[in-house]
Amino acid sequence: MPQPILRTDRLLLIPLADRHLGLETELDSDPEVLRYIGRARTAGEVLESHAQRMASAGPVDGLGYWMAFGCDGAGPGSAAPDHERDGEFVGLMMLPPAHGPDQGDDPAVSDLGYRLRRRYWRRGLAREASRVLLRHAFETVGQRRVIAQTMAVNRGSRRVMEAIGMRYVRTYFPAWDDPLPGAESGEVEYEMTHEMWARLPTAPTIPS
């Protein structure tokens, strides 16, 4: 099952492809966008991360990365474009298999993430896209659990996780080679399970 094109009210989500490298470079070269992730990346570093993203999407059908496009600033009342070429690049939405030194190799667990261009912050777009990705994870791919992780001091990202119904799991302290400001507070992990999703008022019943 290849990654499908997904839609929200305001966003068109297109599976990441090599043609998107320039947009990834623009996004990852902004130090404010990467404030809670690391330093801004060079073009060569983005090329390397692009290759890693494309490779990590392969092991589990339907999981991976999506480029989000909107229209008219993706503000309230705007609609998703019909085609990628008609839209404005908004950001990168992520649902790869869970990875990292503290994550087991479980194909039924995926890792939710979002990275938006600054001009699209505080418009509810990360929440909107995340809900659609969760629906895709549980109802189409058949995931058992979706996690999301961020720095504990990243209140904006944590508000998104809480707003979409994820629950706090833990605070942990990874080994940083070059700690970011706020790293002393650790990282947090949130989760949504298949059972939690099925109980949400807006989620339909999912067969076990």
Image: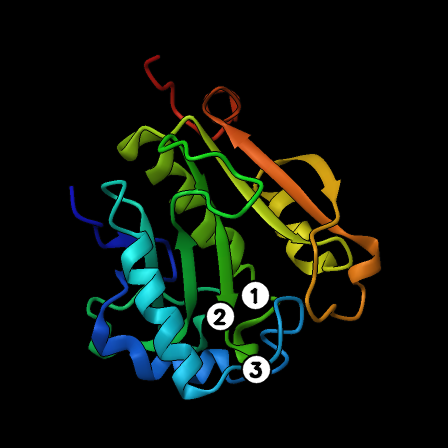
Which residue is the site of mark 1? 123
Q: CA distance from mark 1 to mark 3?
A: 23 Å
In the figure, 150 relative to 109: above or below? Answer: below
**Secondary structure category for the residue under label 2:** loop
Instruction: State the mark number for residue 19.
Output: none
Pointers 2 and 1 in contact (CB under 8 A)?
yes
Query: To which residue does mark 3 refer?
Result: 40
* Placement of the N terminus among the 4 image quadrants: top left
Please state which of residues 11 and 40 is positioned toward the viewer in this rendering: 40
Residue 62 percent coordinates (x, y)? 25, 43
Considering only order in the chain, which callout, 1 or 2, is on the residue closer to the N terminus? Answer: 2
> Residue 139 at what x, y percent from top left?
32, 30
Depth check: give the residue in front, 16 or 59: 59
For residue 67, which quarter of the picture?
Answer: bottom left
84 vs 40, left or right, is left
Residue of label 2 = 75
Q: Give the number of marks.
A: 3
Q: Earlier in the sequence, mark 2 or mark 3?
A: 3
Which is more foreground, mark 2 or mark 3? 3
Q: CA distance from mark 2 to mark 1?
A: 7 Å
How many C-alpha atoms fall within 10 Å of the one at disc 2: few (<14), some, or many (≥20)?
Answer: some
Disc 3 secondary structure class: loop
Q: Residue furthest left?
A: 1
The image shows residue 17, relative to residue 169, as above or below, that is below
Q: Residues within 10 Å of mark 1 (few under 14, many from 20)?
A: few
- Amino acid identity at mark 2: Gly
Question: Is 117 above or below relative to 65?
Answer: below
Of 159 and 168, nearer the camera is 168
Q: 87 left or right of 125? A: left
Q: Secondary structure at mark 1?
A: loop
Say what amino acid the circle numbered 1 marks: Arg
